[in-house]
Amino acid sequence: MQRQDYAPPGTATRHGIIETIRPFCLRKSALSVVASLLCLNAASAAEVVAKAGKFEMTSTEVQGLLASLPETSRSAIAADPRVLEQLVRTELLRRAVVDEVRASGFERDAAVVAQLDKLRDEALMRQWIANKAKPASTFPTEDVVRAAYESNKAAFAAPVEYRIAQIFVSAPNGGEATQLSAALKKAAEIGGKIGNSDFAALAQAQSEHADSAAKGGDLGFLPENRLLPEVATAIRTLAAGQTVGPLKTAQGLHFLKLLEKKEGAVPEYAAIRDSIATALREKQAQQLEQAYLSELGAKLGISVNQIELSKLQSTLQ
């Protein structure tokens, strides 16, 4: 997630004090692509779907390949059929390369054998530690999950939303000194009028952000986690009806008025029960892994010659 600065007037952005977020949206209908592939009937299971020289892939093989992928990858394939085709092409190329390697005898080269042994040992070690750190199948119990939910409700709550109005004066960072001087002068004039004027009318007349100016500066409800940090910090201090400004951002000067504040709702237990359970299992796995490694280190009695190690360190400088 990356922050986007305030968009200058005239862009398609409806306001300029939020972080732009582009979530990967997945339509339910698109999920049926993967679902269909994973539910192929027996009649079509052996059907060849792709060929490359002497290599071919059947529907059954594609089904197995999809089943081995993480959920995020399957979602990407469901959203774009071209991704599935590229996956199949890549798999055929992989088979062809492996075939060439074996035919050439390259895998019997001493250096290659040593590297493969090292990779095998590392993979075996990771699998062994994962097995040692695997939580019991009964963990977490329903009581533990429920307790985690009750004690962390504030963390599960949706972000607070603020309905904000703004008056914007363009003054981008790096702009010409004359432009900044003019912007500061205009901001000073606006600041002198805010206390005695209708904010919406002033925004319509003075704001340089066309979209919000047409609505009296109203930006609608914005979640706190999408606001630029400097804006979020300022807005938290306001009560409904209060104003703050001028506030400098990368693109200019803002006068902000808090119209409404809406507290974030806590999702129902059933909606996040599985994600809490998963997080608890991951946390316990980390704890079990650390306990195993600490116990093994204590058993081995590891000692290090600091003098010799320091000598080696000096050769790296």
Image (cartoon, rainbow, N blue to C red):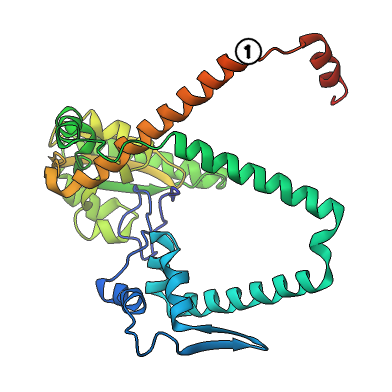
Quarter of the figure with residue 242: top left
Q: Residue at 63% across / 13% down in the picture?
A: 301
Residue 27, compared with residue 174, is above or below; it is: below
Residue 299 visible in the picture: yes
Q: Position of residue 152 (x, y in %)?
A: 20, 30
Question: Residue 222, how many percent across, how many down?
Answer: 24, 48
Q: Quadrant of the C terminus?
A: top right
Q: Is residue 247 left or right of residue 201?
A: right
Instruction: Say whether residue 188 is visible.
Output: no
Residue where numbered disc 1 is placed: 301
Dot 1 falls on a residue whose secondary structure is loop
Along the viewing direction, whichever of 228 and 289 lies nearer the viewer: 289
Residue at (46% x, 34% y) in the render: 132
Return the residue nearer the eye: 182 or 301.
301
* Apparent side of residue 294 relative to residue 109 in the rendered image (left or right): left
Considering depth in this image, is 139 or 207 the residue closer to the camera?
A: 139
The part of the image, by quadrant, that contains residue 228 is top left
Q: Residues within 10 Å of mark 1 (few under 14, many from 20)?
A: few
The spot of residue 115 in percent (x, y) is 76, 49
Horizontal and vertical percent position of residue 97: 72, 73
Relative side of 249 to 245, left or right? right
Q: Residue at x 45, y 49 (%)?
A: 2
The amino acid type, in three-letter code, at marker 1 is Gly
